[in-house]
Image (cartoon, rainbow, N blue to C red):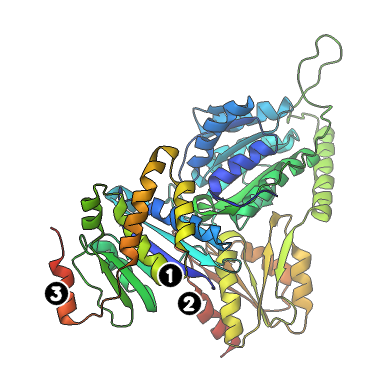
C-alpha cells in the first residue's frame, strides 16, 4: 500500500475506476458528483482512454451499453434524477447480460429535489428501477477508502457475473475528503469475453448481443438463467460489516453515511450503559438477510433500530429478515438533513427505556 | 484525541475550503485520522462558505458535525450562525478585523485576532486565514507547526510555494495571540479594532 493521501470521494471513484482498467467513461454533469467527470476529463487522456460528455443521461447509458457489448470496462456516473433517466438502459444491460459499472451519488428527492445528501434511491437501486425481472449488484461504501476498494471490486464483479454493478453513495461521501491509500497495483481479474462483439474479420460466425427474445420459451430460458445467476451472487458475494453485535441489546442497521453517523453513537450509548451494536450492509443487493436473521435469533438482542436518510426503505428488508421475532424501530431524515447523534441517542434511550 | 472537530466559516474567496484542507493535511502528517466536508449547498451561490474538519486517533464516525470543538469565523453572519454550536469549553477564533460581534457565550475560549489587518500589512490578504490557523495550532492539539508548514507545501500549488516562508510568519503572529476573557472592556476593545 502507498502512503495515505487526502482526496475527495468523487475523485477517488474516478481514480479507482482507471486503476481497475476502465478506459471508457460516458457521463453528463450533475451535482453532487460532477468531480468524477472532471477527473475523468483530466486523466483519461493520460491512459489512452475515452471520456465523453454525452448529450444526456440516456445517451450516456446507451454508450455504456455499446462499449460493454464491445468488451470494454466501462462506467457512467450520475446523481438521482440522472439515474432515473438511465433506468431503461439498466434493464437492457441486464437483459443483454453486459458488465458495466454505474455510480449514483444520491441527492435528495423526489423530483428535481435538492443537491444535499440522501438515501432515497434505495428502493430504485435494489428493487429494479427499470422494467422486468432483473437485479443489479448494489455496493454501499461508507468511507473514501471504501469508495476506492469497492469501485475496483465493482469492475471485477461486473465482469465475473456479466451484470451491472451500482455503487450507491450520497452527497456526503462524494464531497468529503479523507485519506486514501492505494495499492501499488490492482488485482484486475481479467475475464475472457467470448461473447463480445468486436468484428468478425470474416473469420468466424457473427455474434449478437441483444435483450429481445420473441419466443416465450427462449425468454423464459433467459429469465431462468438470470435467476440462477442471481442466486449464485447471493451465495458468493454478500458483504456485511458487524460491529459490536455480540451481547448487544439494540442493533442498529444502517448503510453508507447513516452508518458513519451511527458509528459515533455506539460509543456514546456504551457510556450510558446501553449495549448497542451495528449491522452495516456493504452489499445492499444481495442483502445480508442471514446476518440479520442470526442477530434476531440471539437472546441478548431485544430490538433493532434502522437508520436511514429517507422515510424507511432498507427498513422493509430488515423487517423481512427479522421476520417479526423482534421489534424493528426506525429513525430517518429527509430533504438533505442528516440525523444528529443526539436524535439517535434519544431514540435509543426511548427504546431501551432508560 | 477522539473526534476533535473544527468548523471554518466565512464567505467565498477567503480561502475557507483551502484552509480546511490544509488543517486536515497537517493532521494527517501527524498520523491521525482526518475528514473534511465542505458546504456544497445552494447557499454557496449567496457567498457563504464553510467546511468541517474532524481529527481523531481512531476511526472517524461522522464527518458531518453538529457540535464543534472549534469555530473559526471570518465573517459576522458565520459567527452568529455557528457560535451556538460550539461545545462548552471549546474555542471561538474570529478575524476581528471583519467580525465586529462577540459571541454571546461565557463558557468558551475566545480568540479575537485582527487577521485581515495582519494580512493586509503583510501585503497578501490570503494570509488572514493562515493567521487564524496559527492560533488553532498553538492552542489545540490539532497539529504541530512543522506539520502545518509541510501541509502548505502539499496543499498549495507549486507556483505559490515561494510565499510559504511569509505565510509561516503570519502563522506565528496568529499563534502569539492569547485568549480574551469576555468582559465589557474586552468586548469594547475587540469591536474597536474592527476595520469597516
- Indicate which disc residue A342 carries: 2
Q: Nearer the viewer, residue A237 or B67?
A: B67
- Looking at the rendered structure, the secondary structure element under dot 2 is helix
Label 1 in the same subunit as label 3: yes
Extreme top residue here? A202
Distance between the alpha carbons at the discs numbered 1 and 2: 9 Å
- Mark closer to the observer (1, 2): 1
Whether labels 1 and 2 share one chain: no
Q: Which of the image's four quarters has the C terminus of chain A?
A: bottom right
Quarter assignment of residue A74: top right
**Residue at the limit of the structure toward the right, as seen here:** A204
Between A20 and B99, the one nearer to me in the picture = B99
Q: Which mark is residue B66?
A: 1
Residue A316 or B4: which is nearer the viewer? Answer: B4
Mark 1 crowd level (few <14, some 14–19, many ≥20, 10 Å Cα): some
Which quadrant of the structure image shows residue B50? bottom left
Taking B120 as reference, is B21 left or right?
right
Does residue B90 appear left or right of residue A350 in this picture? left
Mark 3 falls on what kind of element?
Answer: helix
Mark found first going from the N terminus, 1 or 3: 1
Q: Chain of mark 2?
A: A
Give percent across and percent down for residue A155: 71, 40
- Circle 1 sits in a helix, a strand or a loop, which is it? loop
- Mark identifier at residue B188: 3
Amino acid at each position: 500500500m502507498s502512503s495515505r493521501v487526502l482526496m475527495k470521494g468523487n475523485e477517488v471513484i474516478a481514480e479507482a475506476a482507471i486503476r481497475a482498467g476502465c478506459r471508457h467513461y460516458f457521463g453528463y454533469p450533475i451535482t453532487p458528483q460532477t468531480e468524477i467527470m472532471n477527473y475523468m476529463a483530466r486523466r483519461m487522456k493520460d491512459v489512452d482512454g475515452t471520456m465523453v460528455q454525452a448529450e444526456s443521461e440516456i445517451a450516456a447509458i446507451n454508450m455504456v451499453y455499446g462499449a460493454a457489448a464491445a468488451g470494454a470496462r466501462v462506467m457512467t456516473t450520475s446523481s438521482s434524477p440522472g439515474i432515473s433517466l438511465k433506468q431503461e438502459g439498466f434493464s437492457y444491460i441486464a437483459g443483454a447480460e453486459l458488465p458495466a459499472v454505474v455510480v449514483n451519488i444520491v441527492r435528495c428527492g423526489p423530483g428535481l429535489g435538492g443537491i444535499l445528501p440522501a438515501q432515497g434511491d434505495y428502493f430504485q437501486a435494489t428493487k429494479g428501477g427499470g422494467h422486468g425481472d432483473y437485479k443489479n449488484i448494489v455496493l454501499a461504501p461508507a468511507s473514501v477508502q471504501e469508495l476506492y476498494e469497492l469501485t475496483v471490486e465493482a469492475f471485477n464483479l461486473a465482469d465475473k457475473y456479466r451484470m451491472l454493478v451500482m455503487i450507491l453513495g450520497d452527497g456526503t461521501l462524494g464531497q468529503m475528503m479523507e485519506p486514501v491509500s492505494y495499492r501499488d497495483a490492482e488485482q484486475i481479474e481479467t475475464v475472457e469475453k467470448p461473447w463480445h462483439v468486436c468484428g468478425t474479420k470474416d473469420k468466424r460466425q457473427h455474434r449478437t448481443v441483444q435483450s429481445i427474445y420473441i419466443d416465450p420459451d427462449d425468454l423464459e430460458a433467459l429469465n431462468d438463467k438470470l435467476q440462477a445467476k442471481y442466486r449464485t451472487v447471493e451465495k458468493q458475494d454478500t458483504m456485511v460489516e458487524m460491529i459490536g453485535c455480540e451481547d448487544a441489546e439494540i442493533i442498529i442497521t444502517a448503510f453508507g453515511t447513516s452508518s458513519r453517523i451511527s458509528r459515533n453513537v455506539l460509543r456514546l450509548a456504551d457510556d450510558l450503559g446501553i449495549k448497542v451494536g451495528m449491522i452495516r450492509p456493504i452489499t445492499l443487493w444481495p442483502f445480508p438477510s442471514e446476518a440479520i436473521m442470526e442477530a434476531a435469533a440471539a437472546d441478548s438482542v431485544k430490538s433493532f433500530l434502522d437508520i436511514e436518510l429517507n422515510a424507511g426503505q432498507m427498513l422493509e428488508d430488515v423487517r423481512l429478515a427479522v421476520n417479526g421475532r423482534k421489534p424493528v424501530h426506525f429513525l430517518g431524515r429527509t430533504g438533505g438533513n442528516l440525523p444528529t447523534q443526539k436524535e439517535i441517542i434519544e431514540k435509543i434511550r426511548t427504546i431501551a427505556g432508560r | 484525541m477522539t473526534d476533535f472537530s473544527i468548523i471554518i466559516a466565512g464567505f467565498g474567496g477567503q480561502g475557507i475550503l483551502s484552509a480546511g484542507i490544509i488543517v486536515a493535511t497537517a493532521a494527517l502528517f501527524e498520523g491521525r485520522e482526518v475528514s473534511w466536508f465542505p458546504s456544497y449547498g445552494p447557499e454557496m451561490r449567496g457567498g457563504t462558505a464553510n467546511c468541517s474538519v474532524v481529527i481523531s486517533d481512531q476511526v472517524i464516525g461522522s464527518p458531518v458535525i453538529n457540535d464543534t470543538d472549534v469555530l473559526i469565523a471570518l465573517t459576522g453572519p458565520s459567527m452568529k450562525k455557528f457560535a451556538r454550536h460550539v461545545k462548552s469549553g471549546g474555542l471561538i477564533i474570529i478575524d476581528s478585523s471583519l467580525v465586529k460581534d462577540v459571541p454571546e457565550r461565557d463558557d468558551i475560549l475566545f480568540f479575537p485576532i485582527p487577521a485581515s489587518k495582519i494580512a493586509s500589512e503583510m501585503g497578501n490578504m490570503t494570509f488572514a486565514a493562515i493567521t487564524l490557523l496559527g492560533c488553532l495550532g498553538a492552542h489545540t492539539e490539532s497539529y504541530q507547526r512543522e506539520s502545518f508548514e509541510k501541509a502548505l507545501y502539499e496543499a498549495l500549488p507549486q507556483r505559490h510555494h515561494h510565499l510559504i516562508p511569509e505565510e509561516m510568519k503570519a502563522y506565528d503572529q496568529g499563534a502569539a495571540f492569547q485568549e480574551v476573557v469576555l468582559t465589557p472592556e474586552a468586548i469594547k476593545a475587540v469591536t474597536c479594532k474592527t476595520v469597516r
